[in-house]
Image (cartoon, helix red, strand yellow):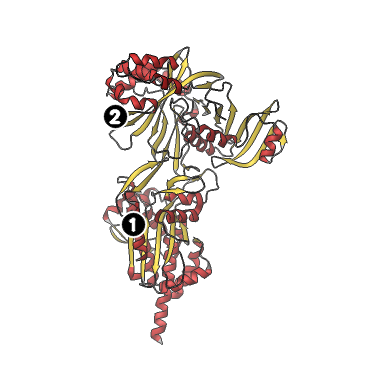
Amino acid sequence: MRKFFSALLAIALLLSVSPFAHAQSGGFTHPEIGELIEFYFTEGMPSFTIYGFTQYKVMEPGTPYRGIRSSGTRLIHGGMDTLDRSLERMFNSLDGQSKEPKPIVFDYTDVLEDYAYQLGLLPIKERVKAIRLLAGFDGVEGYEKLLDIEGFESIDVQKLTSEHRDFSVDINGKTYPYRVLMFYIEEDDWEQIYYERYGYIQMNGEWRLGRITKEYFSEYRQRIKYLHGLADTDISALTKAYAEVMRSSNWNMAPNEVAALESGTVEGNQVIVKDTNIFRLPATLTYSFTDSWLSSVEYKFDSAQAYFSAFVSLYIRYYDPVTIGENGDMSWSLPDVIITLTHNDVAPTITVEPRQHVENTSVG
Amino acid sequence: MDFVAQERGVGMRRLIALLLVLMVVIPSISLAASTEPVTILLLGTDDLGLFSVTGTEEMSRSDALFVVTLQPATGAIKLLSVERDYLVVLPDDLGENKLSTSSYFGGPEMAMGAINSLFELDVSYYAHIDITNVIKAIDIIGGVDVEIDADEVDEVNAFIDGILSHENLSNVKAGMNHLNGPEAWAFLGVRNNDIDTVESNAARNDRQRRVLTACLDKFFQMGSTEAMKLAQEILPLIKTNLTMSNVLSLITTALACDFEKISYLRSPHGSYQNKRVNMHKVIVPDDMPAEIQTVKEFLYQ
């Protein structure tokens, strides 16, 4: 009987996994990078390799990484580990208390980098508390509390307060506070040098871990340096990022203004530009208008493979996707816009829309 | 009179051999007066099996990059093999990338610009051939005789058995082997993934050099009429910016060179660092000015 239930359970698990969950791209040369890339979905989570070496991976939720539970395609749920619990488990793992190899190098990044020495002297629970406060998870009120932690008695609270920035993301039509931590790790294997990022979403006042991603080390000298959710990220880089997908348009434009800009014609509530490209991918561009104001910018591609290429291009610019749907649709929430990559076997699309909630970090 | 005719026959065979070697096995040329050194960039690419996302790429990455200089004053022929993973800065906002990727983005012209920028050279001619055409060209000349080292045999045979499912292919053995086009592809294409990428590339470049030399030997064995006939079949397989006028000038220069005086250098010659920049695994010499000087001295002294 146990065997029967095991078989039933196995079948149920198999059926519960989307057919897309284990899709892969086959090899292709990325038109921006010029390298051979292979793209995979494991348990619905994307990853890709360059010449067979993993470059990027969203950790799949089926096997807790470092003993930490993160999310799958269903992002918002009560089973997500809290901020404190996930960090405690991460530090335990770094001490060799998980099946993952013990690193030989662990470095803080971002705002934590300057306080690495003090953080290293603290016991794990205190260290987690200090990270939480330093990285802005408790808002500007949290910085004052740092003064009570050993090693942080003379910290410049005013500076931290003035530089504090809030972040949020839109998920299924709702807006959630959002923050990211990033760590640099080297294992005793030259291929295992990577950044590990933890994306947290605040639900009902509690910070919970949404995703863990691993980005294998590379010097991104020409990359747009805005990482949404990271305390010390370069907000000015967003101007360039927006200009690329919005071209010279903005949300305050009427159809005739966009048509003039693109030398196109107005067709109903749309301006369509054929034979253009985005991220060196051939595309048809459609500007859509609601109440005579620009409401979305859509790039439609003409091959299934363009989906994988577009993902890599979006990752280069905006790092980790926030939502990853069962069907492969993904979205990146930025301060002003939400960018959605839609999977489609014939004509995948990238859509740029204004966010419902525009953050105080907004640019442009 | 007979002696003169014989000399002319040898000269013609040498010329055709040089042209074919320059234009078939690798890729490119810079032509000036016949007494001046002539430099050509030779590019070899591998378009097999890669899926194009856009369908608009110039071509694939370069597996083989050679700079050849003919020095009519001394009769020397200099063959410089350039590591394809060199870090270069590409134009048109493409930024930092691998040298080999330049041909993917901008064809032979961009590759030539990248090589010139890297070594402060002034190469203005190229010849490019894809591996698919190398296979054809080698079959056209009836195959080549290549010395294969014992430690290369297993990998070449694995390539032949596993990837090439053609009929009429023979496994190779250590020592001299007669290779047809697909077998030569197997020999040129194998890669040892157990060693450092740059060392692996160097070994690959050495195999390319051996095939090049084998083609040369083959042509020396032919009569001029046969060589000319084969040249007419092979030249359409090559993409070059050489004009007919350039070719005639090259002929003059080539006639003044001696194929016994071929010398070979691989860059990087000095020490280097492996890095990953913008998702590319690249190399950066520890002393680039010294590397540039070594390359210039090799090509032009």
Residue located at (55% from left, 46% from top): B55
From the viewer's perspective, is A99 left or right of A75? left
Residue indicated by mark 1: B266
* Residue B155: assigned label: none
Q: Chain of mark 1?
A: B
Residue indicated by mark 2: A103
Q: Looking at the picture, how far across and down is residue B49, in whole percent?
A: 46, 47
Displayed quadrant of residue A2: top left
Q: As displayed, is residue B216 above or below residue A309? A: below
Element type at mark 2:
loop
B15 or B264, nearer to the observer:
B264
A162 or B207, nearer to the observer:
A162
Element type at mark 1:
strand
Q: Which three-letter amino acid code belongs to the residue tagged 2?
A: Pro
Q: As displayed, is residue B284 above or below residue A175? A: below
Report the quarter where the C terminus of chain A lies. Answer: top right
Q: Looking at the picture, how far across and down is residue A311, in whole percent?
A: 50, 34
